[in-house]
Image: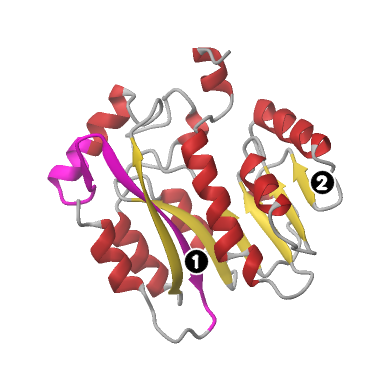
C-alpha cells in the first residue's frame, strides 16, 4: 500500500516511469548496434531501465547511479528479481562525484521540479529555480548522445537552446501528455510553476503538461528537430 512516507522516500509515478522506459527502448536501445556502455543519472527504483532491457536485445551494459539510499535498495532488489545483474549495474553513489565508465550514451529522467529551494517532499527531485538546472549540468558533460526527459513547465525553450549552444542537435523525440501528480502539485512547486507560466517559461493546460523524451546528439543528423520540439513544448 502506498503511503505518504513511501512517496516521500522513493519516486513513484507509474505513468512517467512507463514513458521513460519507452523512450529508453525506442530512442536508445533499439539504435545500439554493438555492445555499448550506457550510463544513467538517477536510476530510481530501476523499473524503467529494467523494462526496456527486457523488451529489447541490447547486448551492452547500463550503469545506473542513484543517490537516494531507499531507491537504491529497491532498484537492487528489482535487478536481482529480473536476473539482470550482469546487464544493469546500479551504484549507490553520486553521479557527479563518481568514477563514471566511458559511455556512448547518457540517459536520465532528471529532477525537474522548479522551486526556490529544495525544501520539498523529495529534495532530490528539485531541478533548481526553473527546473532545468540538472538537465543543463548533464548537457555540459560532453557525452556524444544524451537522452533526457524534458518537461514543458520547466523552461523547455531555454533548455533546448542551451543544448544547441553546447553543440547538440535534437536527433529525435517522443512526447506524452501527463497529469500533474503528487510531487508537482505540492503548493511550493505549483506556485513556482504558475509564476513561470506568467513569465512565459512554463507551459501547461489545466492539469496537463507535456513530457518529452529527447535524444540530444553531437553526431550529424539529417534534420535538427529543435525548432519543431520547441514549438510543440510551448504550445499549451
For mark 1, what is the residue?
Answer: 215
Which residue is most to the front? 55
Image location (x, y in percent) of residue 219: 54, 82
Task: Name above or below for residue 54 compared with residue 223.
Answer: above
Q: Residues within 10 Å of mark 2 (few under 14, many from 20)?
A: some
Does 200 lie within the magenta span? Answer: yes
Residue at (22% x, 48% y) in the render: 203
Residue stretch rendered in magenta on the structure: 194-219
Report which quarter residue 106 is drawn in: bottom right
Look at the numbered discs 2 and 1 and tell me whether their residues touch, using CB distance below 8 Å: no
123 relative to 198 in the view: left or right: right
Q: Can residue 94 be seen here?
A: yes
Q: Secondary structure at mark 1?
A: strand
Circle nearer the N terminus (2, 1): 2
Q: Looking at the image, which residue is at 38% across and 32% down?
A: 117
Seen at 75% across and 42% down, the residue is 91
* Left or right: 9, with 151 as reference point: right
Query: Where residue 189 appears, x then y in whole percent?
Result: 31, 30
Describe residue 115's horizontal placement relative to residue 65 as left or right: left
> Which residue is under mark 2?
84
Q: Is residue 93 left or right of residue 199?
A: right
**Which residue is at the front of the view, 13 or 141?**
13
Q: Nearer the viewer, residue 13 or 121?
A: 13
Picture coordinates of residue 21 (x, y %)? 58, 49
Q: Position of residue 166 (x, y in %)?
A: 44, 73
Amino acid at each position: 500500500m502506498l503511503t505518504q512516507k513511501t512517496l516521500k522516500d522513493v519516486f513513484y509515478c507509474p505513468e512517467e516511469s512507463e514513458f521513460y522506459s519507452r523512450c529508453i527502448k525506442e530512442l536508445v536501445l533499439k539504435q545500439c548496434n554493438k555492445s555499448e556502455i550506457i550510463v544513467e543519472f538517477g536510476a530510481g527504483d530501476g523499473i524503467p531501465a529494467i523494462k526496456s532491457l527486457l523488451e529489447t536485445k541490447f547486448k551492452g551494459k547500463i550503469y545506473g547511479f542513484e543517490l537516494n539510499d531507499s531507491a537504491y535498495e529497491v532498484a537492487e532488489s528489482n535487478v536481482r528479481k529480473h536476473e539482470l545483474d550482469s546487464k544493469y549495474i546500479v551504484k549507490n553513489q553520486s553521479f557527479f562525484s563518481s568514477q563514471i565508465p566511458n559511455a556512448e550514451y547518457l540517459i536520465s529522467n532528471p529532477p525537474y521540479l522548479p522551486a526556490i529551494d529544495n525544501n520539498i517532499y523529495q529534495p532530490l527531485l528539485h531541478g533548481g529555480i526553473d527546473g532545468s538546472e540538472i538537465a543543463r549540468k548533464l548537457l555540459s558533460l560532453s557525452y556524444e548522445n544524451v537522452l533526457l526527459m524534458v518537461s514543458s513547465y520547466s523552461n523547455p525553450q531555454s533548455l533546448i537552446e542551451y543544448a544547441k549552444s553546447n553543440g547538440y542537435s535534437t536527433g529525435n523525440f517522443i512526447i506524452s501528455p501527463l497529469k500533474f501528480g503528487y510531487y508537482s502539485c505540492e503548493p511550493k512547486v505549483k506556485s513556482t510553476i504558475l509564476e513561470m507560466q506568467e513569465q512565459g517559461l512554463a507551459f501547461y493546460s489545466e492539469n496537463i503538461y507535456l513530457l518529452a523524451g529527447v535524444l540530444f546528439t553531437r553526431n550529424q543528423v539529417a534534420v535538427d528537430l529543435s525548432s519543431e520540439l520547441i514549438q510543440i513544448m510551448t504550445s499549451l
